[in-house]
Amino acid sequence: MSARIIDGKALAQRVREDVRERAVALKAKGIVPGLTVVLVGENPASQVYVRNKAAACEQAGMRSRVIGLGADTPEEELLDLIGTLNDDPQVHGILVQLPLPGHIDTGLVIETISAAKDVDGFHISNAGLLMTGRPLFRPCTPYGIMKMLESEDIPLRGAEAVIVGASNIVGKPMAMLLLAAGATVTLCNSKTQDLGAQTRRADVLVVATGRPGIVNGSMIKPGSVVIDVGINRLPEGGLVGDVDFKSAHAVAGAITPVPGGVGPMTIAMLLVNTIEAAERGAAS
């Protein structure tokens, strides 16, 4: 038995085509959807992510603006900039690239972004709406994973879903979305005892820890769906996920590759959140 590959790259392209069509419809009304990304410092990985996001916006027919600030930028200056962007009607989405330099309070920055422009879905208001089953913006990676499961016709109602990793960015919102879909959810963290006993129960297994190979084939229920969120760079330069792909591929029913799985969907859903923000603005 070998798992079928869930092609996130192909699905992301279909999502982006839909966003492009929606952008054309808004432009016919005189509205150009706009995303502004703020990058503080010169983290090489962050610079790559920001370039990819900006390029994806432009390809989708949306206005993209990147504001680069020095690593020593005072926190107050960053907060003032966010306030200006909040008030700019041409900016429909605001994204401050994480991580931020240590002297800046990440939580305060996120809470300063208008909840109506928080296309990352990290604002406490958006987290609360997601918690209560009335999401405004869904965080992009979990949102993309739900689209992947939907595209594969994976039955979630009554399914056992196990998430490894309890971050605010992936694990916790992923749990809320799976609960809303009717799954029974187990959320594991670094203190979980006998992790394999938990993961082997999963019909749907989502792994998001940033630790390469934390899950292998012996920890997977035969025929299950495995979603690998991890992107880890090896010393020799290759990319691997949090799941040992070779052993997992021999056991699972379906699995996402790294690269080409969840990553492209994360950017695609950022575009979806931005176009939704613009559409809400047009309707108000």
Image (cartoon, grey):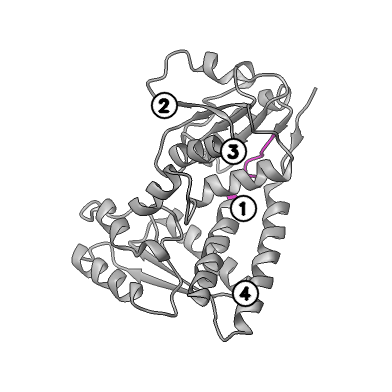
Q: Position of residue 127 (x, y in %)?
A: 39, 48
Mark toward the viewer: 2 or 1: 2
Q: Earlier in the sequence, mark 2 or mark 1?
A: 2
Residue bearing the label numbered 1: 264
**Where does the magenta region start and end?**
255-264
In the image, residue 224 sits, relative to residue 47, either above or below, namely above
Q: Position of residue 145 (x, y in %)?
A: 60, 44
The residue lying toward the viewer, choosing from 124 and 50, is 124
Residue bearing the label numbered 4: 23
The residue lying toward the viewer, choosing from 15 and 42, is 15
| Mark 2, secondary structure of its residue | loop
The residue lying toward the viewer, choosing from 263 and 224, is 224
Q: CA distance from mark 3 to mark 2?
A: 22 Å
Q: Tell me the quarter of the picture where residue 279 sits.
A: bottom right
Pointer 2 local density, CA inside 10 Å: few below 14, some 14–19, many at least 20:
some
Which label number is shown at residue 189? 2
| Mark 1, secondary structure of its residue | helix
Q: CA distance from mark 4 to mark 2?
A: 40 Å
| Mark 4, secondary structure of its residue | helix
Q: CA distance from mark 2 to mark 1?
A: 25 Å
Residue at 43% over, 43% down: 132
Residue at 66% over, 63% down: 16
| Mark 3, secondary structure of its residue | loop
Q: Quadrant of the N terminus?
A: top right
